[in-house]
Image (cartoon, rainbow, N blue to C red):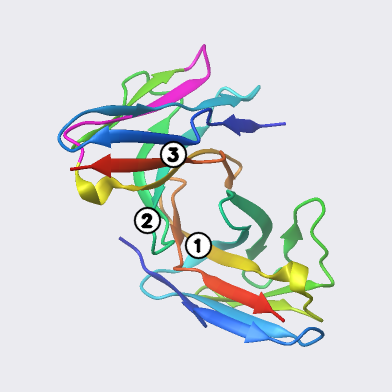
Amino acid sequence: AQTVTQSQPEMSVQEAETVTLSCTYDTSESDYYLFWYKQPPSRQMILVIRQEAYKQQNATENRFSVNFQKAAKSFSLKISDSQLGDAAMYFCAYDRADKLIFGTGTRLQVFP
Amino acid sequence: GAVVSQHPSWVICKSGTSVKIECRSLDFQATTMFWYRQFPKQSLMLMATSNEGSKATYEQGVEKDKFLINHASLTLSTLTVTSAHPEDSSFYICSGDQRGSSYNEQFFGPGTRLTVL
């Protein structure tokens, strides 16, 4: 069975600083996708970043980047130059066979 | 990005009644639509997967007779909560994946908050 673990229920960061959210997953597959989704107070799920497992290069989207360690089954999200608008729940998700399995989420607070 | 709408955004109903939630992909055709349930301060749990014109596939533990899913077209899926009870109160979110997309990206609706009295 595939599981996704986010060990940090809450994190906080000062505006303009950098924060890293952790995620580990368990799978026996070699080809899959990993995602980070953001859920602000509006509850709308927003895709932050996507990583394909067969790609060794870490994905980057502007201020968001991942550290993908396939052997360790680790997929952390780094947010650089944090902004007040980054405050939200962040969910790590594993995708195989078109089904998303979400982690329990990390609530990120951003302080001015 | 692709847009998914849900209607209604919130609904309050009495115990024992049925409630229908619509999920529409507005600017793309969804090969597959997904229904999730999210309890307060918890993660999203996949309830079922549906393909246009086919019966939905339900996840283990989800009662298919209580949560009826109809995927009538490539842009519309409905979830009907039959004989709703207070424990069905939750936030229901749908998503669709874009037909022909090379990525396994799901586009999410804004969710529907169901409160059963």
Do callouts 3 and 2 mark residues in contact (Cβ within 8 Å)? no
Mark nearer the N terminus (3 vs 2): 3
The quadrant where residue A65 appears: top left
Which is nearer the eye, A92 or A69?
A92
Three-letter code, disc 1:
Gly
Determine which residue is flagged by label 3: A35
Please give the range of residues in magenta.
Answer: A70-82
x, y percentage for residue B90?
A: 64, 66
Q: Identity of the amino acid at label 2?
A: Pro
Q: Are marks 1 and 3 on the same chain?
A: no
Disc assigned to residue A40: 2
Nearer the viewer's eye, disc 3 or disc 2? 2
Q: Quote the CA–CA distance across marks 3 and 2.
A: 16 Å
Residue placed at 66% from the left, 32% from the top? A2
Which labelled disc corresponds to residue B96? 1
Using the image, determine if residue B34 lies above or below residue A53.
below
Q: Is residue A45 magenta?
A: no
